[in-house]
Image (cartoon, rainbow, N blue to C red):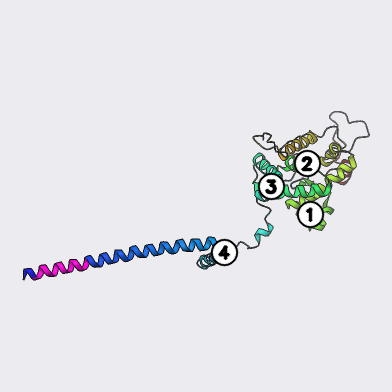
Amino acid sequence: MNKAFDATARGLRTFVSDVADGFFEITHNGFALVGLAIVFAALALVARPDLRKTGEEQLMGWLESRKPAPEATDLEPTAIVRTTAASPGDLPKQQAAVAYWLSKKYRVAAEPLSVLVAEAYHLGKRTKLDPTLILAIMAVESSFNPFAQSQVGAQGLMQVMTRVHGDKYESAGGTLTAFDPVTNMRVGVKVLQECIARAGSLEGGLRYYVGAANLDDDGGYAGKVLAEHERLVQVANGRNPPTMATPAAPVVRAQAQPIPVAVPPKPQQAAEPAADPQKVALLSGVS
């Protein structure tokens, strides 16, 4: 009986050993076949770019078909159309350098700045104005805040006096478009052109632009713009001037007053009533 059990046990061990050896042999050969198949497939894809492209398309289609559906939100799928932003990498090298430098100095994202820089270069080419001058005015006026507003009603990136130049916004849809960055730039450049033509010089035009044409002092406005313009020219030419630790504060426009024609009032005399805003705007050239 014991001999029978021993014989049976040996038979089972032999059977299990044979099955295991067979399994490992099949597995080894299977892996070898898989490896060979991968090598041949790789060689075929290298030799036949059309097959590689077809395979990539099928793989992407397979992955997209298994992609979970996006969660429902209140966001509109067309919101990208209204987004004023672009990749700085898509800009020419010179414009990208300007965008990155302004982004670092004024702590504004480079993507929306890329749109403004590209638009400034487009407007500069069309109007014969230096694009870095346009950008310098925006830097000094609003530090690239498209929603900025001064105490006297200058609005947007270039701080255009909307109530004075409202007609320039009509073709864009009205004065509310003063807060659209690109529209504000276009109107601001048009106002700047008029100011320079009226003054006959760039510096004089800047005095008109800030509303200081009839004042003894423009508060250093023209100097600030021209200094920032010079720094941006350096950046565009491949140099890297230092940036300030904090951005310059937006210009505070004072309500310009007409030049007096009478003897100034004595001390303690009551102040004269404020001038008519429309008359002030015409006399001072406030933008």
Across and down, in percent, residue 201 comes to 87, 38
Q: Earlier in the sequence, mark 2 or mark 3?
A: 3
Type of amino acid under label 2: Leu
Judged left or right of residue 187, residue 85 is left
Query: Which numbered disc, 4 or 3, marks the residue closer to the eye?
Result: 4
The disc label shown at residue 133, or none: 2
Q: Residue at x 82, y 58 (%)?
A: 171
Q: Earlier in the sequence, mark 2 or mark 4?
A: 4
The residue tagged with tag 3: helix, strand or loop?
A: helix
> In the displayed structure, does residue 77 sit left or right of residue 46?
right
Mark 2 or mark 1, whichever is nearer to me: 2
User: Dot 4: what SS?
Assistant: helix
Q: Are marks 4 and 3 in contact (CB under 8 Å)?
A: no
x%, y% of residue 193?
A: 85, 45
* Residue of label 1: 175
Estimate the x, y position of residue 61 in percent, counting from the top left.
54, 67
Q: Main secondary structure of the magenta part?
A: helix
Looking at the image, tell me whether mark 4 or mark 1 is earlier in sequence order.
4
Instruction: Classify mark 2: helix, strand or loop.
Output: helix
Q: What mark, if any, has residue 53 been given in the picture?
A: 4
Q: Is residue 83 above or below residue 205?
A: below
Span highlighted in magenta in the image: 4-16
Would you say the residues marked 2 and 3 are in contact, meaning their CB atoms lie under 8 Å apart? no
- How far is mark 4 from mark 3, CA to CA? 37 Å
Q: Are the two marked residues, 2 and 1, in contact with CB atoms closer than 8 angstroms? A: no
**Quadrant in which the C terminus is drawn:** top right
Q: Residue tagged by mark 3?
A: 113
Mark 1: secondary structure: helix
Q: Amino acid at mark 1?
A: Thr
Give the class, few, some or many, for how many residues have Cα within 10 Å of label 1's Cα (few <14, many ≥20): some
